[in-house]
Image (cartoon, helix red, strand yellow):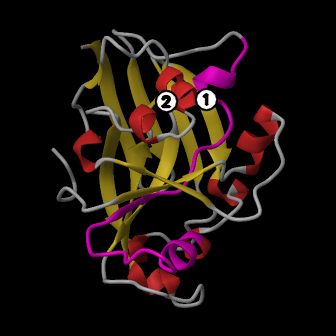
Amino acid sequence: MLPIDRPGKIVCVGLNYRDHAEEQGVELPAEPLLFAKWPTSLIGPGEAIVIPPIVTKADYEAELGVVIGVRAKNVSKESAFEAVRGYLCANDVSARDLQFSDGQWTRGKSPDTFCPVGPMVARDEISDPHDLRIRAIVSGEVLQDSTTANLIFGIDDVIAYASQTTTLEPGDLILTGTPAGVGVFRDPQRLLRPGDDVTIEIEGIGSLTNPVVGG
């Protein structure tokens, strides 16, 4: 069951962990790289990630999700946390074949079921969201193990940056990026396949597990 109502927007940040940039051999971005996932991609804990027949390279991405609690437009970095309602575990499941072939990311990031989230905790339950261990475990194997201290742009940076052009509304969801260890950049690659289960763990928030099935 979803821990939140379906949001109007899912705003995501690409290439936002230092270790993830290092594993790709690319320079750190000067500004947040924003993209979107369609809200129809959202599922809750225990629901199946369904890989469509068209997708041949489905990947996992452990992410810290931020749920917006109040309308936010042109907010400052200093006041950005006042817009936060809570935090949750998220999995930015990605169809790498579609993502890389399209040249922009929306279609590859937004297949139905490609945004599992939950559980959620209130903002005040996390003393420092920029110092949390974050892991992805696929069928019992730990494939991502990092910390939100590796974020390039913090939650406050992202909220302030996004709200310069886009009004953030109550219930909107921000996915803050993924650390090193995603399947497509491993050698050999470790992509998702039917029969897998994926668990996202974030310190102080809990864990999110979803099975993987074929479409």
Counting every numbered tag in the picture gives 2
Residue 191, image x, y percentages: 52, 16
Of callouts 2 and 1, the N-terminal one: 2
Identify which amino acid the numbered label 1 is placed on: Val
Quadrant including the N terminus: top left
Distance from disc 2 to disc 1, alpha carbons, whole Å, reads 6 Å
In the image, 50: left or right of 30? left
Task: Identify the magenta region.
Answer: 158-187
Q: Nearer the viewer, residue 137 or 9?
A: 9
What residue would you read off at disc 1?
182
Identify which amino acid the numbered label 2 is placed on: Tyr
Residue 147, image x, y percentages: 65, 51
In this picture, is 126 found above or below 82? above
| Residue at 45%, 38% in the rendered image | 200
Q: Secondary structure at mark 2?
A: loop
Quadrant including the C terminus: top left
The circle drawn on residue 60 is: 2
